[in-house]
Image (cartoon, rainbow, N blue to C red):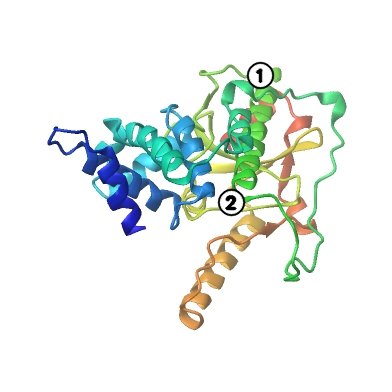
Amino acid sequence: MNQFFIDFEEYCKSPRLNSNKAKSYANAIKYLCSFLNITTINEQAYLEFQQTSLLIKDKSSDFYNNLLDFLNNRTQSSYLLKGFIQAALSYFFKFYFHTNRIGNINTENNVLIEEIKDSSLKIEYNENKLKKELPLDTNLNTHNYNISVTNGTVKQSVNKIKSGRIAEKYFIDFLQKRDFIDNVDFIDVANKRNYGFDLILLDMGIEIKNIKSGSFFLTDNEIAYLTNGLTHLVLIDIDNGIWLLKNNSFWLNNIIQNIKQIREHCSINFSSLDLTDIKIKINQTAKQCLVDLTVLTKNQIIEIVKS
């Protein structure tokens, strides 16, 4: 990688012009590699950079704001805010093409990125389609360590982002069909960097989870919001049901305590491991704590969210 940055900086230099532009462009790509966890410059890295060049154009996107937070913590935000990363990417694509003599790079992943543009994600809540069957994760053996062929990491990430945003828009459409007014009764803040949740509903934060698989995950930040009483969970399986899981429910509190205990045990006994993602499986006990929002009127929803 070091040799790549040396060669790339040399490529970016302007003849007969002594400036820091080349060094800044090399640093911009280096910092972007750190954010994306890229350790080798290859075709996969090229594809990820292509996606990045699209995503950072949307300053309201999660990707842009996560990148900005990452750079802010390293006092390098100017590389994004002043356009060095975008400009450096243009040079990178020419440099990669020149040094690798590539023809047409597979642009399938660019198509995937187009799929998750907010304007292209349309989903409607339809009362008549509801099955109202809470998805349960009954799989007892999820780790068999057998080799399997799965989608690439980029496609998996895109699909995850897409399914999450579709669930958010589905819930918004449900609220509107219950006569909740956009930007009055609720505010969509999913793509706003100053919020750690998806929606503000009646002054309460709402974290929305797509539970089609019968399970979901909670980040450390989401747990912090829940335990401080700042958010509730809304669990959604599109065309099946919408359930409210309040932050003070005994099942959720027990799950959060279990997560903390598992991580504490791991930090003491397995210090080289970090259990970042722990799948939370929805079971029969959870059903006792869930409220089916689809059977409630607007006033009933207001009462239960505010109570």
- Report if residue 255 is visible in the image: yes
Pinpoint residue 272: horizontal percent, then vertical percent: 47, 77
* Mark carried by residue 116: none
In the image, residue 234 sits, relative to residue 6, either above or below, namely above
Residues packed near mark 2 inside 10 Å, few (<14), some (14 to 19) or many (20 plus)? some
Residues packed near mark 1 inside 10 Å, few (<14), some (14 to 19) or many (20 plus)? some
Q: Which residue has dot 1 on it? A: 176
Q: Closest to the observer: 73 or 231?
A: 73
* Mark carried by residue 248: 2
**Left or right placement of residue 58 versus residue 241 in this view:** left
Pinpoint residue 56: horizontal percent, then vertical percent: 43, 32
Pinpoint residue 188: horizontal percent, then vertical percent: 53, 27
Quadrant containing the N terminus is: bottom left
Instruction: Find residue 29 and report its image quarter.
Output: top left
Q: Closest to the observer: 15 or 301?
A: 15
- The amino acid sitting under disc 2 is Asn
Which mark is first along the chain, 1 or 2? 1
In the image, residue 35 sits, relative to residue 98, either above or below, namely below
- Residue at 51% from the left image edge and 35% from the top image edge: 204
**Left or right placement of residue 266 versus residue 168 in this view:** left
- Residue at 87% from the left image edge and 24% from the top image edge: 128
Pinpoint residue 211: horizontal percent, then vertical percent: 72, 46
Instruction: Find residue 122 and report its image quarter.
Output: top right
> How far is the residue under mark 2 from the one under mark 1?
26 Å
Foreground tag (2 vs 1): 1
In the rendered image, the residue lying farthest to the bottom is 269
- Report if residue 194 is visible in the image: no
Q: Closest to the observer: 240 or 274?
A: 274
Q: Closest to the observer: 191 or 29?
A: 29
